[in-house]
Amino acid sequence: MNWGRMFGNCDYGFILPALARFPVPLAHRLSDLRARIRFQLRRVSRERAVENLALAFPEKPPAELNRLALESFQVQARDEMESYWFDRPLPFLQSLVETEELEVLREACQRRRGVLLYTGHMGNPGIFLALVGRLGFEMNLIFRSLEDIPLNPQAWVRFGNKRVSKLERASGRTVRYAGRVSYFALRRLLRDHETLMMAIDVVPSLVGRTVTARFFGRSCVFPLGFTKLYLDARPSVVLWSSHHSENGKYRFLLKDITNELEKMTTPEEVTQCLVTRLEERLRLQPGIWLQWDALDQFFAERKEGLRDLRD
């Protein structure tokens, strides 16, 4: 009997939706407790996150590295729990937010050249996407397919599909899945002045075209598609993140980096600029990144090693 899968089904099928029914402050505290339990149970993920944090921040003591790894678990747990709030009344969503900075996105949209809105699996993206969509910013969400993330319990898959459906209703667009949507379709959307929301992620396989950039002091590999979209369509580019402030409310941070990219002509230049801005945000708030257990999977030497094994 797979006890881990049984716990996962119970967690996503019963515990998670139950937490979302409590008042906001209590729901967040219970969500943090759920994260602490998951932090203890998921030993491999926990240890890998701490190890990768030590590579990125060698000056930090072990206790601080452990705290940051736990914080990333708590951020993810809150984001999952808040999925059940996406379709609540708009005033409720707005009451959760302290700082919006949506004028940055509004100005980018008004240029009528398309917008690449990018992030890096950091903070609490769900509330941002749900609220921004409900406020009239129609955007095309580019996600990794749930089918590409194996070995998860069925309750997690059902939870993920419901989350996607809610975000589709909020954004006013059908979610498009990376690897299944044509590059030319995405380029056409940008040329039609649409907004694409994409996250910089680990390259899922050795087959796709990639580009290398420095990330946390290492030579790392990233998918080429995002950079190629920029060079072919020359849209506005906005980096965004969403996270809780000390009072428990959200801060949406948006930075328009279009001017920085204007004179760049190579994939390497563009990718390095995108990644550098992302790293700057993460160095200020390392606990908001949800991929610390996967940082080493970005490393170019790891990709080369895996390629040699496959060959």
Image: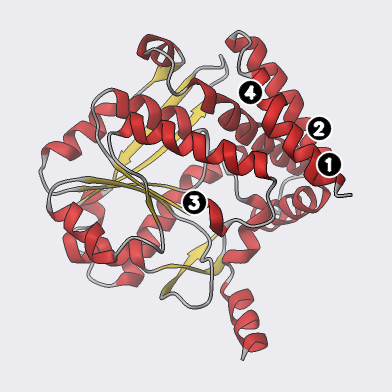
Question: Which numbered disc flags the more N-terminal residue, 3 or 1?
Answer: 1
Query: What amino acid does circle 2 point to?
Result: Ile
Q: Is residue 90 left or right of residue 22?
A: left
Residue marked by disc 1? 41
Q: Quadrant of residue 79?
A: top right
Q: Residue shown at 41%/58% (left/top)?
A: 178
Image-quadrant location for residue 103: top left
Q: Residues within 10 Å of mark 1 (few under 14, many from 20)?
A: few
Q: Is residue 283 above or below residue 269?
A: above
Q: Residue at x 51, y 66 (%)?
A: 203
Q: Nearer the viewer, residue 281 or 20?
A: 20
Residue type, label 1:
Leu
**Dot in front, 4 or 2:** 4
Separation of marks 3 and 1 at Cα, in angstroms: 29 Å
Residue 25, horizontal then vertical, whole percent: 62, 11
Quarter of the figure with the C terminus: bottom right
Q: Amino acid at mark 3?
A: Glu
- Residue on which disc 3 sits: 279
Disc 3 to disc 4, C-alpha distance: 33 Å
Q: Which mark is residue 17?
A: 4
Give 231 or 78, whichever is nearer the viewer.
78
Residue at x-position 59% and y-position 69%: 299
Determine the CA span between mark 2 and mark 3. 29 Å
Q: Earlier in the sequence, mark 1 or mark 4?
A: 4
**Local crowd size for mark 4, using a 10 Å CA cut-off: few (<14), some (14–19), many (≥20):** some
Give the residue at mark 2.
37
| In the depicted structure, whether residue 284 falls above or below residue 272 | above
Q: Is the Cβ of the residue at disc 2 closer than 8 Å to that at disc 1? A: yes
Q: CA distance from mark 2 to mark 1?
A: 6 Å
SS at badge 2:
helix
Q: Secondary structure at mark 3?
A: helix
